[in-house]
Amino acid sequence: MNYEVRQLGKDTWMIRSMMVQMFLIAGTEKAMLIDTGAGMGNLKAQVEKLTDKPLIVVNTHGHVDHAGGNFQFKEVWMHADDFSAADWMCTLSERQEYVRSRLAVFAPEQTQEAVDSLQPCVDYEKKALTEGQVFDLGDRELEVIFTPGHTHGSVCFLDRRYRRIFTGDTVNYGMLLQKSYECTALSVYVESLKKLLARGGEFDTVLRCHGEPVGTKGDIQIVMGMVQRIISGEVSGEHFVNPMRDCWNYNFGQKYSVSYDGPDAEL
């Protein structure tokens, strides 16, 4: 299983597996891996090709495409509110289903090779992230910002030195906000976006895990406006079904959309 690796500046790499982007950040003393994908191939070996520094592994949230490779590492940090999500979503059977359903839509010819690359899970230690926690990598610090919405335990990581924020799936072109995927009410998500905007003086660049990885803090304002329009009833969605999900889809131009539980769901 091959990974696409792209350097995004000094000591910062994007590692893409299928449709998911992970990020590797190095300081002078330690390195940090943000998310572990669905666990296809040998992510640990790929990281070791890029850095030999002691590694801290963190999750932005517990979904299968972000925590599915956790078992390749001895310990992983994530918010405690997503411990249970990572447990049930990242089993071998759930990872296999995730890969099959996504590739059936986007790359059916790759499906069997990708499924065959998935290895059974082994136990690893979960360590609980907390709001405001800081990881010192040596001349580079990453702060945890708690941003529930996409999941109950979603977090972002602020890299003040390079004025970047790693948002996981808290900010994407296509936002998944269905309760069946461990998402919160829309109003909770909006408060998290307001929190990020309040910290906007500390970063310029948003690094996200799907689509084009590099964005700006303007993307946060756009996504918040979309969700607020759903809450206010200004826009209506369409029932949407494919092998990946059954939801109501709210479209906002060519790039942006929100997948939600529909007009009768709790806001």
Image (cartoon, grey):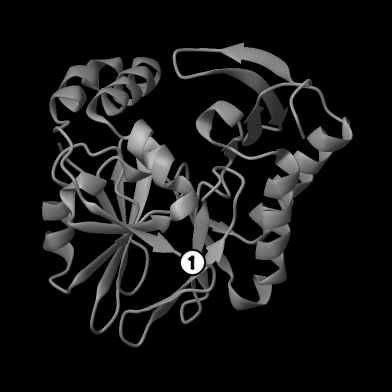
Q: Residue at horizontal 18%, vertical 45%?
A: 123
Q: Is residue 40 above or below residue 103?
A: below
Q: Where is residue 175 in the image (x, y as percent from the top left)?
A: 59, 37
Q: Residue at horizontal 66%, vertical 72%?
A: 199
Quick one: 244 or 185, which is closer to the camera? 185
Q: Locate residue 234 relative to residue 90 in the image: left or right.
A: right
Q: Residue at horizontal 78%, vertical 21%?
A: 263
Q: Answer yes or no: is residue 165 visible.
A: yes
Q: Position of residue 125 (x, y in %)?
A: 24, 55
- Under mark 1, the amino acid is Thr
Q: Locate residue 220 relative to residue 114 in the image: left or right.
A: right
Q: How many labels does the image show?
A: 1
Q: Locate residue 66 relative to residue 204 in the image: left or right.
A: left
Element type at mark 1: loop
Q: Where is residue 91 in the image (x, y as percent from the top left)?
A: 27, 31
Please tell me in which quadrant of the rendered image residue 33 appears.
Answer: bottom left
Please tell me in which quadrant of the rendered image residue 126 appears.
Answer: bottom left
Q: Is residue 194 above or below residue 97?
A: below
Q: In which quarter of the image is the N terminus?
A: top left
Q: Quadrant of the C terminus?
A: top right
Q: In this view, does 232 lie above or below 108?
A: below
Q: In this view, does 38 lie above or below 159?
A: above
Residue bearing mark 1: 130
Q: Around disc 1, counting alpha carbons within 10 Å, would you say few (fewer than 14), some (14 to 19), or many (20 or more)?
A: some
Please tell me in which quadrant of the rendered image residue 17 appears.
Answer: top left
Toward the bottom, the furthest residue is 139
Q: Residue at horizontal 12%, vertical 61%?
A: 49
Q: Where is residue 56 in the image (x, y as percent from the top left)?
A: 27, 67
Q: Answer yes or no: is residue 166 visible.
A: no
